[in-house]
Amino acid sequence: MTPRLTSDARRALGAAGLARRRFLQQSSALVVAFGAARYAGPDSRLSAQGINGRSSAALDAWIAIAADGRVVAYTGKCELGQGLFTAQVQLVAEELDVPLSRVTLTMCDTAVTPDQGTTSGAQSHPANFNHANLALACATARQALVRLASDRLSAPVSSLATGDGAVFVSSDPSRRLAYADLVGGRGFMLTLDPAATRKRPTDWKVLGTSVPRLDLPAMVTAQLDYVQTVRVPGMLHGQVVRPPSVGATLARVDEESVRGMPGLVRVVVRRNFIGVVAEKPFQAAQIAAKLQVTWTPGPALPPQAGYYDALRRDRASRDTCLVDSGDVDQTLRGARTVVTATYRHPFHMHGSVGSSCAVADVQPGRATLWSATQAVYPMRDTAARLLGLPAEAVRVVFTRGSGCYGINGADTVTYDAALLSQAVGRPVRVQLTRRDEMAWENFGNAFVIDQRAGIDAAGSIVAWDYEAWSPALGGRPGYDSPGNVVTGWLAGFAPAAAAPRTPAPAPSTPLSNNLNTAPSYVTGCAGGVCNGTGTVRSERVLSHRVVSPFFTGPLRAPERFQNTFAHESFMDELAAAAKADPVAFRLKHLRDERLRTVVRQAAVAAQWEARPSPRTGAARAGTAQGRGISCVLYEGDNGYVSIVADVEVDQATGVITVRRLVGAQDCGPISNPDGVKNQFEGGALHGMSRTLFEEVTWNDQAVTSHDWRTYRTFAVGTRTPVVELVLVPQPSAEANGAGEASITAVAAAIGNAVFDATGARLREIPFTPDRVKAALAVRGTA
Amino acid sequence: MSQMTLLVNGRSHAVDVDPATPLLFVLSDDLALKGPKFGCGLGQCGACTVIVRGQAIRSCVTPVEAVQKTEITTLDGLGTIERPHPIQQAFIDEQASQCGFCLSGVILGAKALIDRTPAPTDDDIDRALAGVLCRCFGHNRMRRAIHRYAAARRA
């Protein structure tokens, strides 16, 4: 194999003192290239690791063990605040049997790291990452080192073990050879062996332990680099001027309005994209504020009041039916009780604390972009389209940003910086204003969900019918759709469009419950396979996707949050209709043993009192207490969680106070237990914020929730619930995600607890005091 | 533009800037400090927090001319990776961070509080951090770290 390197890659490696060219030419290292083996193998999960990823023609991914025993590893999975840097260093140290301190990890730089697509969702969490790529490369290397040592020590491979960066004879550890000695002055080029043997989780010494975050000392002392702190020689500062309303188009820019302002370098216009470039950031802000721009308004936005009904009426929908047993209507006609309910979820935003930022240096024929994107290779390809450059001429260097929770403004601001830098021929830094961040990001989808189910005389669910409407526009740009975010669209690229399709074709393939569209309680039979986790055989799951007035995109537990709120709240309504304990009622309709286990464990940890909801004899005034449970198998196959919420409801004010969130989680073998706990805690409180406070608002022209007064969350100076987690270890199972489990389950747990406390059912997020009071007013009747 | 002197983290800096420039821009752009960060530019989130005269203030809405010749402390000025300040060490001990973008507001807000009120109650912490956001929601660990620091400081 002859690995090819871009000039940027050579420069970067040279700068790091780790030139691969030198490894190869001076033959003083052991190098493992991933090559095409990355997607080989019978396990479909291997390809899941490279969400949207595709192999890179320009260079291969690799790890290298230098002649001094130092390990250099390259990964296409990025640190987003979730602890993935530390967990990947643990992975390398574990699989290679070297100390953590000997590992250097480089993340997400198109000049040197493999194309591993997007770092997103629970897939990226310590509990589920890189086990088909980086781990196998390390296992390949360790295997090779053992073979080398076998020759040198004249000992059979089976008699050897590895530890602390050396191979030794198990029965006589004094007979040992350090990796550095084994590599010595020689060179080894290996191709990743998909059959290399990974360490068993039961043998883990570094993985499976709560290694403290390696980046925290630099983070808390303000020494860590973020994209917001990147400084490039000669760097200018840009600010964009977004349209005043959704869909507006540019009529005229009056450059005279800013002529002579201090620091002005240029006003940049490309179709509907406008930005200004100045010497100083404050100058850019002042110029952008002063620039006179005339816009032609677009069509009025649909009124927010009544928007959920408008979604249902939209006939240009793309319809998908995941399962349909064909007998739902008939079964419901025969049911003893039929329960119906409609759930509503608004648009939510990512709302990163830091507004998004990027630095671009675009020169004739080449460009370097410092970006907090979750997807460096897709960013490379789409930015190249925007700039009219070949993809190979663009280098994207991932640099951490503020926690993103999905596609916040990180991608769009990278395009902003690129366009402005290209226009002025100098490096440009752009940081969005709070308004530009919040009014134009890709929101999490609104949803309206109708649920209908029947219960028989024995108190069992006999049929479940789900029908949902949700709007979407744009999303992640992927490799070819820069118009999926606002800047690309302003610059003239169309968002990827889904063609309307009604009616939905009958389901013919096995259920993939990736978006948790199907409830946990149905059998999920389609295409001859029953992939669901429940017992209800009469089932229908039908979705309608319509065009959104706003850009949308993945937001932490995208769609799964919305669907699980509807499913787990409705399950609680069914339990109440059957006068059954909510835990027992769930267990009665679940056949997946691991899901049943987390439900039981959460109930035990929360000292769940078995009885139907609502609590009997509760006063209808004053403060009421209650508890609620929910559960989900995240993405249908990617982590089990159950949460019990304890709440208090002030029945005079309608204010909900969540006192405690107790969970049980099973994500297979656990790479870093404290990392999982940190994710569980953050996800639970993030979900509580979304459930109680968050809602995107708009008027007939524009988004009106564009700062922290108009888009509510809760501050660090807020009394938060106790959050506790029981980890259910499953060392022999497949690794699952953990970062999006708790957020998915928490909304329904809170709503169910409010019902338990008061008998009032909350079916619309957020649970504002007014909505709580309205639900209290009609309790017992709806 | 005008010349002025800033005292930041124990060092004196001469800068030539528009006196109306928000302090944050001078700290992060002219002085290249990494601690205070632009979150909202509206004084609503705390990411830009610095300590001036014992108070945690929002540098994004403070004109630089208002703090000339006044000692300014940023997160960069507390401790180093090798020798973190005890409150920074408390955040490491509690693993009280995810993305870390909010830490200037959380750590400096808590430090200014505890400098004034060595034994803060939870109500005190609520008030001190009422304008500080963390969207990774590390709230519970952060509060533990603050109590840990306060307890160690009293010991």
Image (tube, coloured by chain):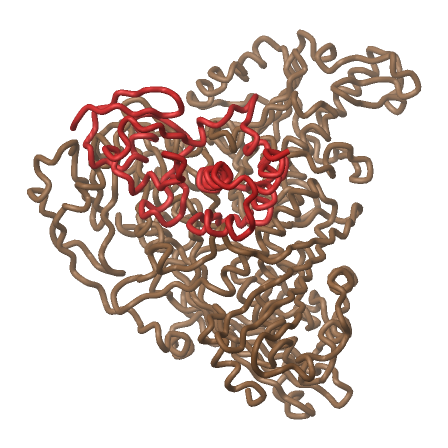
Residue located 64% across and 56% down the image: A722
**In the image, residue B15 above or below residue A312:** above
Residue located 54% across and 24% down the image: B81
Residue located 47% across and 81% down the image: A774
Q: Is residue A229 visible?
A: yes
Q: Is residue A422 visible?
A: no
Q: Point out residue A61 in the picture as x, y percentages from the top left corner.
A: 57, 29
Say which chain is brown.
A
In depth, the one of A7 and A485 nearer the eye is A485
In depth, the one of A358 and A528 nearer the eye is A358
In the rendered view, does A635 fall on the left or right side of B57?
A: right
Q: Point out residue A515 in the picture as x, y percentages from the top left corner.
A: 57, 61
Q: Quadrant of the N terminus of chain A?
A: top right
Say which chain is red.
B
Total labels: the figure holds 0
Q: Point out residue A598 in the picture as x, y percentages from the top left corner.
A: 74, 60
Q: Quadrant of the C terminus of chain A?
A: bottom right
Q: Point out residue A525 in the picture as x, y percentages from the top left corner.
A: 68, 71
Residue A137 occupies which quadrant of the picture? top right
Residue A600 occupies which quadrant of the picture? bottom right
In depth, the one of A591 and A705 nearer the eye is A705
In the rendered view, does A95 fall on the left or right side of A247?
A: right
**In the image, residue A494 above or below residue A191:** below
In the rendered view, does A131 fall on the left or right side of A9?
A: right
Residue located 65% across and 72% down the image: A626
**In the image, residue A324 above or below residue A430:** below
